[in-house]
Image (spheres, helix red, strand yellow):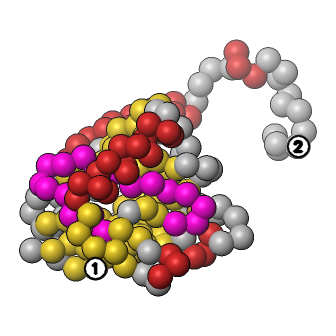
Amino acid sequence: MSAILPPPQRVWWKQPLDRVELLWIVIALIWCLIMFFMMPFWHIYGKQNLANEAYRANPGDYMKKAEDMIAKYKVREVGPDNLKVPVVHPPAGADVYMVARLWSWYPQLELEAGKSYRIHLMSMDWLHGFSLQPENINIQVHPGYEHVLTVTPTNPGTYAIICNEYCGINHHTMSSRLYVVK
Ligand code: CUA
């Protein structure tokens, strides 16, 4: 019998199952179950996946929270005169708001190593991607959704944030910095 010709007995599913066939079905099923339960297991014990939350939220309200936070915790500004970006240094444990929009991240964050923060992300226009380099953190940032990730930076240094979802003509310029200080 070949796969091209029709089987000699048309009602093939009524034929008895071969032992080898059954064995392979059992092996495949067991492997499927192992792979399936590996997903939640590795999420908890592998310490590789981000445990983040997302909520539907109003962009106007979100922008207001970001502006309030910037007014409270701004420590300096960076960038050329016409493109100044505020840098905020929030206290440990604070809710930190970052806005993604065509084609910038606003504001820049300065965090302390060993302290935990809740970083909120939202897009004001369309889909952007939050990619923290060289760490392996990747988050899609959608308009109308507030993403919250709890992070505890461990190594001081200057990190790069780049947009990794194509968002138009200046997508390649949509980058920022994240500072981790002692
Ligand atoms: Cu924002 Cu690409």
Report ligand 1 position as a quadrant. Answer: bottom right
Q: Across the whole image, how many numbered discs are drawn on residues? A: 2
Q: Nearer the viewer, residue 71 or 163?
A: 71
Q: Can you see residue 120?
A: no
Crowd rating for badge 2 (residues with CA inside 10 Å; few <14, some 14–19, many 20+)? few
Residue type highlighted by circle 1 = Thr
Name the residue: 20% across, 72% down. 180
In the depicted structure, whether residue 126 falls above or below residue 169: above
Q: Quadrant of the N terminus?
A: top right
Q: Magenta segment: does it hold 90?
A: yes
Residue 181 counted in the magenta span: no
In the rendered image, the residue lying farthest to the right is: 5
Residue 69 point in image, percent of width and height = 29, 51
Q: Identify residue for label 2.
A: 4
Left or right: where 94 falls relative to 59: left
Front tag of 2 and 1: 1
Q: Residue 158 bears which disc, if any?
A: 1
Image quadrant in which you'd find residue 115: bottom left
Q: Residue 16: name its quadrant.
A: top right
Instruction: Identify the magenta region.
Output: 87-104
- In the rendered structure, the answer to whether residue 36 lies left or right of residue 152 reads right
* Lower position in the chain sequence, tag 2 or tag 1: 2
Q: Amino acid type of disc 2?
A: Ile
